[in-house]
Amino acid sequence: MRLLVERALSDNRNDARAARKELDAMTQHVCDLAPFQLSFGGDPTRVFGCTPVDMMHAFMEGLLKYVLVAFFHPLSGKIKADIDVAVDEL
């Protein structure tokens, strides 16, 4: 189905016309939505293979680690020690 839609939206008029006829035979219509044009990092399935992110793992195993490194890396050792003391007092 994905390939038929891509063919129906192609610049090759003959190929697009044939693909649209095949879609019509399956009572499907071509709908060129904005997400079809988005890049999904080289994923060949593009919008059709895009699934939501598991927020718990994305946060705990990915985003949080990067944010902590970005926040604490530029700080001096004394400031990091002061933050440790403040956290221990909580």
Image: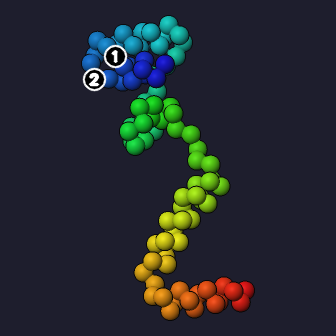
Residue at the extreme right: 90
Q: CA distance from mark 2 to mark 1?
A: 7 Å
The residue shown at (53%, 72%) is: 68
As shown in the figure, which amino acid type bears the numbered disc 1? Answer: Ala
Secondary structure type for disc 1: helix
Residue at the extreme top: 25
* Residue 41, image quadrant: top left
As shown in the figure, which amino acid type bears the numbered disc 2? Answer: Asp
Give the x, y percent position of residue 38: 40, 41
The residue shown at (56%, 89%) is: 81
- The number of callouts visible is 2
Decide if residue 7 is in sight here.
yes
Residue at the extreme left: 12
The residue shown at (36%, 10%) is: 18
Q: Which labelled disc corresponds to residue 11?
A: 2
* Residue 73, image quadrant: bottom left
Secondary structure type for disc 2: loop
